[in-house]
Image: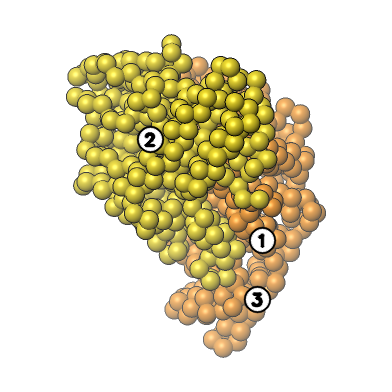
Chain colours: A orange, B yellow
C-alpha cells in the first residue's frame, strides 16, 4: 500500500534522494565501498561537504560574511550553544515565546545572561503569534522561532528588530525565500526539510562571534567549525551526504520560490477542507497558520469520532497524523518533499468521513 | 576490483550490516517507508534503540548501575563533557598522556578543574605507553585512552587505580572483553568498531553523576539522556540503527572473545611481516603495539620507496593505508569487520615488493 507520510520529523524526503541515499550505502559511486565506511578526510566526502555548503549558500542567497557549518545535537543543543557563544554574563538577549521549543530556548539561555521575553502566547496555549512588542536596543540579539512544529503556527513576516535576529528555523527551513540580512544566526535540525536526523546546520554572520569572555571548549566554539570547515573532528558523514542530495533536489526543482509555492498550495488545500468540513476545526489563529504543520481537531460535536478517523487514516496508509499531546487531535506535517497528491488524498478521506458521519 | 579497507575511521563495517543498512534506507522492514523518514518516537525506532542498548549491556557484560546512552559530537565533545559533568571547580582529575587524543582530552579538561598529568610519552612522539606512575588518591577520576589511533599503541592491561577510571575507548571499543568494574565512565565514537560516524556511546556508572555544582545546560547533562533513554530530543536515528546491526553481528559471530581472537590473529600476521621484512619497520614499542592500528614505515635504507609501495597498494585495491602525518609511513587499521584475508593480501604485497626491491 502506498504510504502518505505526514510525520513531524524525521519526515518525508524526496523519493529520488532516498533512492540515491540507499545506493550510497550499498556501494558509493561504484567505488566498491559503502559511504558509511569511507574516511571523512578522503576526496569523496570532502567533495560532498563542500557541495552541501556551497548549495546552501546558493539556494538561500547568503551574502558575504555568512558562514555555513554542520554540527550535531539538534536545535536543543543550539538552545544553549547560541547564548554560550553570543551572550556574555550580564548582557541581555530578547526572546519571543511562541511555543514549546521557543520556551525551551528561553530556559536554556537563562544560564548565560539576562533573558527578556518580549511577548508570549503561552497563556493561550500558543494558538497565535504575538505581534505587539518592542525589542530593547541594548539586547545582544532577538531570538525567534520561525515555525512552531507542535502548535502549527508560523511567522509569515519576520519582525523588525533593532538588533540582529537569531532564529530557530528547524521546522520551516528551506521552505520559502527570505532576506538573510537581518539575521545574525540561524539554526536548524536537518530532520524536517533538509535530511535525516543527525546533523544541525548553523548559519552565522562572522561578526557575531568572538565577543564573549567565558572559557570556551573547542567543540562548543562555532569558530572551530568555521576554521576547519566542519572537519575539526569526524562529522556525521551520512546525514550530511543525504542533506547534500536534498539540497541538489531543491535546486533542481526550482529553489526556495518553488518550495514556497508548493507549500502554500498544499496548505491551502488542507486548511480549506478543515474550514469547510463540519467535522473538523483548526486550532490556531488563521493568519498565523503554518504551511508546514497544520493542526486540527474534531469539531466540538464530533470529538467522539477522533479515534475512528485516526483508524481510517492508518488503514489508508496515512502515517504520522497524530497531533502532539499538547494540542491533541491531528497534525499534518507537509514538508517540502510531501506530494500535493498526499494532501489531496487526506482531504478526500476527510470528505468521505463527513459524508458518512455528518 | 575487490577493496581492502584499512581506513582509521570511519572504517570497514561487516558486509551483512552494510547490506541490511542499505535495505533500511530504501524500504524499512517492508513498511514502504525509508528509515530516514520515520519518527524517532514510533515503534520501529523505539525497538531499535532499545535493542542497541540491551545488546551493548549484554555484549560487554555491564553490571547493574551502569547506563548506556547515545549521544553525538564524537569523542572530541566528550573531552569537555566528561569533566563538565564529573569534575567541580577546584577538584583534581588525573590524566595519562599517550597520544594526540589523550592530549586534547587534557587540554579541554583544564577548563573545568585541576588536571594532573601522571605520565606522558609525548617527548618520545608517543611511541610507547608509560607504565610507571602513581595516581593521586584525591583525584576524582583517572582518564586513560585505551588505544591511540594515530600512533598505534594500546593499553593491553588497564592500569590499577585508586579512583574510578574514565576511558576514551573510541578506537578499540568492542574489540576485546574487559572487566567494567574499575570504570566510572567509558566513551567511544561509533566510527571504528561500532557503526558509521554520527553517534557517540557513553557508558556511565550512575553514582559518578550529580556531584558538581556548576550550571548545566539540559543537553550537556548526562542525566537528561539517562532519564529520557537518549530520546530527550531527536537522536541520530540512522547511525544508531547501523550500530545496532553491528552489535547484532558481534553477538552472532562470537562476542568480544571472538573479536579479540580475530584481532590478535590479524595483528600477529601483519606485525610478523613488518618485523621479518627488511624493507619495513614498526614505529612503536613492541609490547604496546595496537591490535587495531598498526603503524609502520620503510626501513632507513628504503625510505625512498615509500611512494612506490603506496602506489602499489592503491593499484591493488588497498584503501586507507596512509599513515597519519604525525608518524608518516603506513597505518593499517584492522577493526573488527576487517577479514583476515585483507591482512594476508597486504602481507603478500609487502613480500612481493621486498623480493623485487630488497
Mark 2 Cα shell of 10 Å, populated few (<14), some (14-19), many (≥20): many
Q: Position of residue B180 (x, y in %)?
A: 25, 39
| Chain name for mark 1 | A
| Chain name for mark 3 | A
Mark 1 Cα shell of 10 Å, populated few (<14), some (14-19), many (≥20): some
Most extreme residue toward the bottom is: A356
Residue A318 disc label: none
SS for callout 2: loop
Q: Between label 1 and label 2, give the one nearer the viewer.
A: 2
Q: Between label 3 and label 1, give the one nearer the viewer.
A: 1
Residue identified by numbered label 1: A19
Q: Residues at badges 2 and 3 in contact (C-beta under 8 Å)?
A: no
Question: Residue A237: which quarter of the image?
Answer: top right
What residue is at 44 percent from the left and 56 percent from the top?
A: B245
B344 shown above or below B133: below
Q: Distance between the residues labelled 3 and 1?
A: 24 Å
Q: Describe residue B335's horizontal placement relative to residue B259 as left or right.
A: right
Q: Split into 4 quadrants, where in the image is the C terminus of chain B?
A: top right
Residue identified by numbered label 2: B169
Q: Which of B151 and B115 is in front in this view?
A: B151
Q: How far apart are marks 2 and 3 (CA)?
A: 51 Å
Amino acid at each position: 500500500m502506498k504510504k502518505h507520510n505526514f510525520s513531524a520529523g524525521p519526515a518525508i524526503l524526496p523519493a529520488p534522494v532516498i533512492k540515491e541515499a540507499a545506493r550510497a550505502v550499498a556501494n558509493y559511486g561504484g567505488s566498491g565501498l559503502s559511504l558509511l565506511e569511507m574516511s571523512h578526510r578522503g576526496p569523496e566526502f570532502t567533495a560532498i561537504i563542500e557541495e552541501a555548503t556551497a548549495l546552501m549558500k546558493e539556494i538561500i542567497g547568503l551574502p558575504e560574511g555568512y558562514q555555513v557549518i554542520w554540527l550535531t545535537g539538534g536545535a536543543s543543543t543550539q538552545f544553549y550553544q547560541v547564548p554560550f557563544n553570543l551572550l556574555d554574563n550580564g548582557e541581555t538577549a530578547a526572546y519571543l515565546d511562541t511555543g514549546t521549543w521557543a520556551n525551551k530556548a528561553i530556559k536554556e539561555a537563562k544560564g548565560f545572561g539576562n533573558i527578556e521575553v518580549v511577548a508570549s502566547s503561552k497563556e493561550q496555549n500558543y494558538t497565535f503569534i504575538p505581534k505587539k512588542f518592542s525589542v530593547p536596543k541594548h539586547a545582544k540579539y532577538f531570538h525567534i522561532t520561525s515555525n512552531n512544529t507542535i502548535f502549527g503556527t508560523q511567522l509569515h513576516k519576520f519582525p523588525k528588530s533593532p538588533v540582529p535576529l537569531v532564529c530557530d528555523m528547524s521546522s520551516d527551513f528551506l521552505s520559502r525565500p527570505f532576506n538573510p540580512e537581518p539575521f545574525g544566526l540561524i539554526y536548524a535540525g536537518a530532520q524536517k526539510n533538509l535530511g535525516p536526523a543527525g546533523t544541525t546546520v548553523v548559519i552565522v554572520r562572522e561578526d557575531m562571534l568572538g565577543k564573549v569572555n567565558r572559557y570556551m571548549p573547542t567543540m562548543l566554539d562555532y569558530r572551530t567549525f568555521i576554521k576547519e570547515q566542519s572537519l575539526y573532528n569526524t562529522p556525521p558523514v551520512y546525514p550530511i551526504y543525504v542533506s547534500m542530495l536534498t539540497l541538489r533536489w531543491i535546486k533542481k526543482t526550482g529553489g526556495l520560490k518553488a518550495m514556497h509555492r508548493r507549500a502554500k498550495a498544499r496548505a491551502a488545500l488542507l486548511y480549506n477542507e478543515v474550514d469547510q468540513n463540519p467535522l473538523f476545526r483548526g486550532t490556531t489563529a488563521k493568519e498565523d497558520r503554518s504551511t508546514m504543520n497544520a493542526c486540527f481537531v474534531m469539531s466540538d460535536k464530533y470529538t467522539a469520532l477522533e479515534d475512528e478517523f485516526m483508524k481510517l487514516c492508518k488503514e489508508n496508509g496515512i502515517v504520522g497524523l497524530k497531533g502532539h499531546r499538547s494540542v491533541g487531535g491531528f497534525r499534518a506535517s507537509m514538508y517540502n518533499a510531501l506530494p500535493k497528491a498526499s494532501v489531496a488524498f487526506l482531504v478526500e478521506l476527510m470528505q468521505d468521513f463527513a459524508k458518512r458521519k455528518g
